[in-house]
Amino acid sequence: MKKSTKDSIVVGFALFSMFFGAGNLIFPAFLGNTIGDQYILGVIGFILTGVGLPLLAILACSKGDGTFKSISSKIGPRFSVIFTAILFIAIGPMLAIPRTAATTFELTINPFFPNIPAFVAMAVYFIINLFFVLGKTSIIDTLGKYLTPVLMALLFILITKGLFMPIGSISATNAINVFPTSLLEGYQTMDAIAALLFAGIITTSLKSKGYKNKEMPSMIFKSSLVAVLGLAFVYGGLTYIGAQTIGLVPSEIGKTGLLIFISKSILGNIGPAIIGIAMGLACLTTSIGLLTAGASFFEKISNGKLPFKINAIVISIISLGLATLGVDNIIALSVPILNVLYPVSITLIVTTLLSNYLKNIKAVRVGVYTSLAFGLLSAIPGLNLTFIPLAEVGFGWFIPTVISILIGYIIYSPKTSQESQLD
């Protein structure tokens, strides 16, 4: 096997493992249970935002120096620092990392060791995280070579058997707005935002393996393709299996309860143990990636005044506190936050990928700030924005953002200054 192929597979496995966290098992199966016979449409929508957006995010970062800073700094250095910090805080110690700990407890620990207090189990979880994170020089190879193959093998067994030996028939649920709902469910994985932050880790790993600037785009694409193909298989399979559970479970079963039911129905009494191990590994690898990225970021922007090790420990402590809220409360907390972060992130990703055509940086800035404004408006409780196209399905920011970029092109001439060049 060629060295480049081997490296792209190892880094791709690592990227898959960092993406594949709590939401990647929780949301697809529950979505399938909700939409029933419309699962194909649901799979397409979920994969677009849960797989397509992360791939586009990494490719967008690769157009710069491989980091999110290289694409966000074009909006402005202050914007870049502030928004990147918000991303790290929001999907790190505020949402994603606590969710991994809470999910691990609810699916991996509590069903088999009900007498272990949640706080104690989660504290041990973060100690394990720190063991890997503080040895950050080998983090990519550790994830890619050891943890991910075990995780993928467990999931392959579960999903393959569920595909060929259905646990129930698929019926109609009369769900409405299936496609936009599926897009929003893909949001909940937070993979697109995570991709913006993980891109720097992947780039650093490839550079350490000897790849130069000209080789980087190809290697990043190959590695990302490995990750997204794995994610698409898991999302599609779990959504289809979830659609088989209609009529077999009560409507109030909840997301983690549905997973336990599916695993037991497919694999027997050993099923919950297998899904618990898979979830534990998935959550662990994701939180390791987020902790590494977050600790590195705050060390860099503080010029070393906030050391990597201290950052990792502080993030772990904050995450431990929030994890005690439980999965459902963390998910509820994440909805308005993601409704603000995603419009800006998507606008940055798309405008960067279309930079050969969108060369007026001032017009792009107008679009980015418009997406931020409408994202903030959507997060205000009780504010009725249904008069805006697509607002009822969660995309009220899209049309105003496109219009604002067009208006920006009318107001600002792309030839007024050197600043108008968006590489």
Image (cartoon, helix red, strand yellow):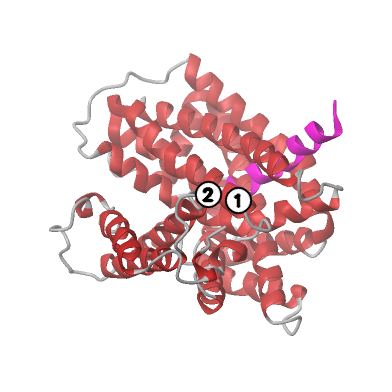
Give the residue displayed 52% in from the left and 65% down from the top. 323
Q: Decide whether residue 420 is among the magenta residues.
A: no
User: What x and y, as percent, mark residue 288?
Assistant: 68, 57
Q: Is 365 placed above or below 399 here?
A: below
Give the residue displayed 49% in from the left and 14% down from the top. 164
Residue type (three-letter) at the residue carrying disc 1: Cys
Name the quadrant containing residue 276.
Answer: top right
Dot placed on the residue nearer the N-terminal end, 2 or 1: 2
* Residue ranking furthest to the front: 415
Name the quadrant containing residue 226.
Answer: top right
Q: Which residue is mark 1?
A: 283
Per the image, label 2 sits on a secondary structure element best described as helix
Q: Which corner quadrant holds the C terminus?
A: bottom right
Q: Which residue is mark 2?
A: 22
User: What x and y, as percent, mark residue 165?
Assistant: 47, 15
User: What x and y, as percent, mark residue 166?
Assistant: 43, 18
Q: Which corner quadrant holds the N terminus?
A: top right
Residue type (three-letter) at the residue carrying disc 2: Ala
Q: Which mark is residue 97?
A: none
Q: CA distance from mark 2 to mark 1?
A: 5 Å
Give the residue displayed 56% in from the left and 51% down from the top. 60
> Which contiguous range is marked in magenta?
1-22
Mark 1, Cα crowd under 10 Å, few <14 / some 14-19 / many 20+, is many
Mark 2, Cα crowd under 10 Å, few <14 / some 14-19 / many 20+, is many
| Helix, strand or loop for the magenta stretch, by majority | helix
Per the image, label 1 sits on a secondary structure element best described as helix
